[in-house]
Image (cartoon, coloured by chain):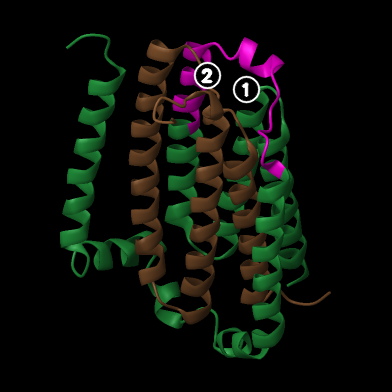
Amino acid sequence: MLTDTLLFYTFAVMVLSGGILTITRRNAVHSAISLIVSLLGVAGLYLLQRAEFLFVVQIILYVGGIMLLFLFVIMLVNLDEAARERQFHGQWALALACVAGVALQIGYVVWRGAGSFQIAAATPAAPDPAAATGNTERLADVLFSEYLLPFELASVLLLVAVVGSVVMAKRRL
Amino acid sequence: MHPITPLHYLLLSAALLLIGTLGVLIRRNIVVVLMSIELILNAVNINLIAFSNSLGNINGQVFAIFVIAVAVAEAAVGLGILLALFRNRATVLADEIDLLKW
């Protein structure tokens, strides 16, 4: 239990510090590397909660796929002159005030409704069938039976995204 | 030390969501704005996995997979748009793209 707590705080620090560095770094490559740290922290949180398949997906797909895409684009668009300019636009104070307002709302809801989360915490965290079959197996069972149609629709969405990004990124068709 | 409850995960996810929102709102660089959107989607995933684990229900993880699929599509299309934009306007700063502004 103590190990769980320590690991949670380690990953939480990784996630939050990576996120803050992502939105404050001047150089976009540094932002991307901070985002990788943050995404690895999120992957660790998945592992802490026994979502092993998503842990692997997060590392292979996010860190290996999406971040690679980001780094390629950063090198293609040559952000050197953008890094020398002002990083935050004129309405940053207003944006900060809006986000602080939302933070207050979330804090209020958590403060008033903290009791209702105890129900979720009180239930046994891991049902025994989870130990009998692996996480990936159970996930596949649900994904390919109950969520088969959304799964197929997701493949159509990815196909459209691939075709769309090729069409937009290509110089002349 | 206290054991970790779902509430901890919810607070962490809320904090990450706010960081991502702030990044979308204040940064001028579109690449960083797209990265902030990835942060927001990850905050949602943390929530889904936390509830999936505490309620012992696998459906939350399925939804997280769909969120990841949509995030991939969003990143691919967003970066494609960014490349097209950079070719036409030679800028990646969000407030210099004001063709529709009168």
Quick one: label 1, few (<14), some, or many (20+) residues within 10 Å? some
Q: Position of residue A30 (x, y in %)?
A: 67, 26
Q: Nearer the viewer, residue B2 or B74?
A: B74
Q: Position of residue A32 (x, y in %)?
A: 60, 30
Q: Which mark is residue B61?
A: none
Q: Chain of mark 2?
A: A
Quick one: label 2, few (<14), some, or many (20+) residues within 10 Å? some
Magenta segment's dominant SS is helix
Q: Are marks 1 and 2 in contact (CB under 8 Å)?
A: yes
Residue labelled with disc 1: A29
Q: Chain of mark 1?
A: A
Classify A77 as above or below A63.
above
Judging by colour alone, the chain drawn in brown in this rendered image is B
In the image: residue A96, left or right of residue A162: right
In the image: residue A50, left or right of residue A6: left
Which color has been applied to chain A in this rendered view?
Answer: green
Classify B35 as above or below A42.
above
**Is residue B36 within the magenta segment?**
no
The residue sitting at 71% across, 51% down in the picture is A96
Q: Sequence order check: which comes first, mark 1 or mark 2?
A: 1
Give SS at disc 1.
helix
The residue sitting at 20% across, 37% down in the picture is A160
Residue labelled with disc 2: A74
In the image: residue A40, left or right of residue A169: right
- What's under tag 1, amino acid-wise? Val
The residue sitting at 51% across, 16% down in the picture is B91
Q: CA distance from mark 1 to mark 2?
A: 7 Å
